């Protein structure tokens, strides 16, 4: 069997590389030489470049180092790509060392940390690959980013993957002879993430558990662990793997609307890095290999530019790890942990995993009874709750900030009473764009005001708290033949819709990516009781 068939990541990487390479401006006469955001330098439909795309330098150098580059590339070609990407990055780095992702002069703490991590990874991968002077220019580009990350913090939410990215970045930066202040900053971030981890194994993303983004958090925490294992981190990673293993579905999908951020993508590299140390990680990696090969989980091919660089680098690291772990003795019973009937209740996450001999049901109590139901005999059934429309405005049962009333009626029957809240739907308009740009060159230059405004925007887009004085009680009978009955109280002249399929009602740019099961999702069979 060829390496390409054994290693599913290489196929996806090969299909994506033309898009990535086309995005890099390689015209040395251009003022935007080296910038990897084609919408900015080529189409000129964006008024600032998204700096996160410069991070693809890590994947490019790793593929080249491990002889996984799919083209016949000379050393000069790789040098030219690296030189361009570093040049473009230096040009877009602000005086304070920050980088922008979502708006000009945004000064994104997360993006700055993420690109810094990618640059230090690229430096490691470039040993004996590129010229020494060019390698040193990578470290020169990193230094201002590290100063910014140490001196600043984001405040619009507790986002574990952001904190972990910064911790992994500074952990690597300390290895290059930097002060104990850098190490202390990294240790503080790691401690903060580990303290926030639930006893149920999940790391908070906007206050809840989100499997997709937790797989990205594992990418950074595994990097820290593999460089210097600690017992505390070992326990945290083991607990995280157990939680994530619940979210590997029988049809090959991963996560979904029951997560706090509605994501169902899967970053594979962290799990692969841990496969040598944790049997559960090897089992998960083996199963998810098949999902990625068959597009049964959101893969690199479905990702747009906002997540392109971190997912590309994750696939490159997974491809490298896969090629090195092919000889590991894979557990022949990789699927056994999902076979035995059991019910796992995670009250802090508001999640119930009901595993039977012929079914798996995932239920979110915090989101008004969002249900994923898998059986051997048919496609997944997804019931995303109820939506009500009145005067052109939609409200939903999915709001995780509206505390539910949960009652077990019997061993297999549960009721969830939820208050419906208005769906936060804000879209760009010319006027709003002008306002954001004016803020970018005025108030955004003052950090306290910038963070205050960002908090306000996040509150409007992600969090909803406006009640419409309508309650829904959802009665669910668990088992292979799942039953759902909804009872609304207080509705008046509302249009009622049962949400089926991958419909999330909060703003989250990383939700809704395509996977092959979307072509065969079953409508949930719920009923209404008046």
Image (cartoon, rainbow, N blue to C red):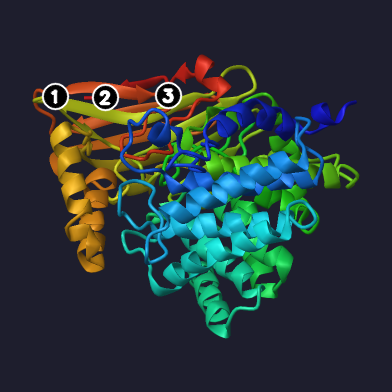
In this view, 411 is above or below 439: above
Residue 308 visible within the image: yes
Residue farthest along the bottom direction in this orientation: 180
- Tell me where residue 106 sits by quadrant: bottom left
Q: Is mark 1 in CB contact (under 8 Å) with mark 3?
A: no
Q: Of residues 231 and 333, which is closer to you in this image?
A: 231
Name the element at disc 3. Answer: loop
How far apart are labels 2 and 3 at the CA level? 22 Å
**218 or 223, which lies in front?**
223
**Residue at 65% across, 63% down:** 136
Which residue in the protein does label 1 denote? 494
- Find residue 76 and report its horizontal and vertical position in percent: 73, 42
The residue at the point 31 percent across, 23 percent down is: 498
Asked if 514 appears above or below 235 in the picture, the reply is: above
Camera-side mark, 1 or 2: 1
- Looking at the image, is mark 1 or mark 2 earlier in the sequence? 1
Query: Residue at label 2?
Result: 529
In the image, residue 329 lies at what x, y percent? 90, 46
- The percent position of residue 107, horizontal first and vertical second, equals 35, 58
Task: Residue 501: give its label.
Answer: 3
Which of 234/21 is in front?
21
């Amino acid at each position: 069997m060829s390496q390409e068939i054994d290693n599913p990541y290489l196929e996806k990487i090969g299909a994506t590389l033309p898009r990535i390479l086309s995005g890099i401006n390689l015209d040395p006469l251009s003022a935007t030489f080296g910038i990897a955001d084609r919408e900015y330098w080529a189409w000129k439909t964006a008024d600032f470049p998204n700096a996160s795309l410069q991070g693809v330098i890590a994947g490019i150098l790793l593929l080249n180092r491990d002889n996984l580059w799919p083209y016949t590339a000379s050393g000069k070609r790789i040098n030219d790509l690296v030189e361009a990407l570093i040049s473009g990055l230096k040009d877009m780095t602000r005086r304070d060392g920050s980088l922008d992702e979502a708006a000009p002069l945004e000064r994104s703490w997360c993006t700055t940390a993420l690109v810094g991590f990618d640059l230090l990874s690229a430096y490691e991968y470039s040993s004996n690959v590129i010229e020494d002077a060019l390698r040193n220019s990578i470290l020169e580009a990193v230094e201002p980013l590290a100063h910014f990350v140490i001196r600043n913090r984001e405040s619009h939410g507790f986002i574990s993957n952001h904190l972990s990215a910064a911790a992994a970045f500074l952990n690597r930066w300390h290895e290059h002879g930097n002060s104990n202040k850098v190490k202390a900053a990294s240790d503080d971030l790691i401690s903060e993430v580990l303290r926030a981890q639930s006893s149920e194994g999940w790391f908070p993303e906007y206050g809840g558990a989100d499997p997709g983004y937790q797989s990205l958090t594992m990418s950074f925490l595994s990097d820290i662990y593999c460089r210097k294992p600690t017992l505390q981190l070992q326990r945290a990673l083991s607990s995280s793997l157990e939680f994530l293993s619940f979210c590997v579905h029988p049809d090959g999908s991963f996560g979904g609307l029951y997560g706090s951020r509605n994501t169902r993508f899967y970053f594979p590299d962290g799990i692969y890095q841990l496969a040598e140390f944790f049997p559960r990680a090897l089992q998960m990696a083996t199963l998810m290999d098949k999902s990625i090969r068959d597009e049964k989980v959101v893969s690199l091919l479905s990702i747009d530019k906002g997540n392109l660089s971190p997912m590309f680098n994750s696939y490159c690291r997974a491809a490298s790890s896969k090629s090195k772990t092919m000889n590991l003795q894979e557990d022949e019973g990789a699927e056994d942990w999902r076979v035995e009937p059991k019910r796992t209740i995670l009250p802090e996450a508001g999640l119930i995993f009901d595993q039977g001999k012929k079914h798996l049901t995932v239920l979110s109590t915090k989101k008004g009874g969002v249900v994923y139901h898998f059986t051997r005999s048919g496609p997944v059934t997804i019931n995303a709750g109820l939506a009500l429309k009145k005067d052109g405005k939609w409200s939903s049962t999915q709001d995780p900030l509206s505390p539910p009333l949960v009652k077990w009626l019997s061993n297999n029957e549960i009721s969830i009473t939820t208050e419906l809240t208005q769906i936060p739907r804000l879209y760009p308009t010319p006027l709003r764009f002008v306002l954001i740009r004016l803020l970018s060159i005025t108030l955004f230059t003052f950090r306290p005001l910038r963070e205050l405004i960002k908090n306000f925007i996040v509150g409007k887009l992600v969090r909803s708290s406006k009640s419409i004085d309508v309650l829904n009680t959802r009665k669910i009978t668990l088992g292979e033949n799942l039953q759902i009955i909804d009872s609304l109280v207080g509705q008046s002249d509302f249009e009622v819709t049962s949400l089926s399929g991958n419909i999330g009602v909060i703003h989250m740019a990383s939700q809704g990516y395509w996977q092959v099961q979307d072509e065969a999702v079953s409508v949930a069979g719920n009923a209404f009781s008046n």
